[in-house]
Amino acid sequence: MKRMTAYLLIAFAGLTVCGLLVLRHACRTAPLLPDTSDLPAPPRRNVAPVDRWQGEIKVDTRTDYPSEPMRRLLKKLRQEEIRQRPQEGRN
């Protein structure tokens, strides 16, 4: 029993020393804060707001897609949705 206690104490001491060394390394290599500058802030660039260009995106509301592969794909998607029954909380 004494031997096991000694092993536990040695392991704990080793982990503590390792943690302190890691902390010391982190403190020594941490980036320093940059010096504050007396220069004025750079001028604002003329950038369009996100809302404006998002408003220009038009949603395709068509439901009658002309291509046959697209119709088959939509049909498969509807069948899969019905099979999984999301309203019942499955999948």
Image (cartoon, rainbow, N blue to C red):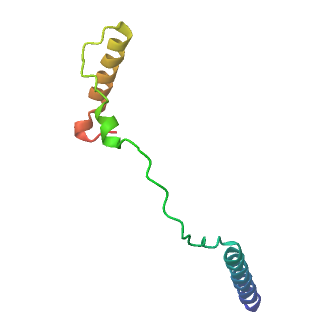
Location of residue 56 with respect to 41 vertically, above or below: above
Q: Is residue 87 above or below residue 33?
A: above
Q: Where in the figure is residue 64, as x and y percent of width and height?
A: 25, 13
- From the top left corner, tell me how far across and down residue 2 is, in percent: 74, 92
- On screen, residue 17 versus residue 88, left or right, reads right
Q: Is residue 2 above or below residue 46?
A: below
User: 91 or 23: which is nearer to us?
Assistant: 23
Q: Quadrant of residue 60?
A: top left
Quadrant location of residue 89? top left
Residue sitting farthest toward the bottom: 2
Q: Position of residue 63 (x, y in %)?
A: 24, 17
- Residue 87: give x, y in percent of width and height: 22, 37
Most distant residue in the front direction: 39
Q: Residue at x 35, y 42 (%)?
A: 50
Please tell me which residue is depicted at 49% across the width and 64% down the height of the picture. Answer: 40
Question: Could you tell me which quadrant the C terminus lies in?
Answer: top left
User: Residue at coordinates 31% horizontally, 8% vertically from top-left?
Assistant: 66
Choose between 21 and 52: the one closer to the eye. 52
Horizontal side, residue 37 vs residue 51: left or right = right
Given residues 25 and 34, the one toward you in this image is: 34
Image quarter hosting the N terminus: bottom right
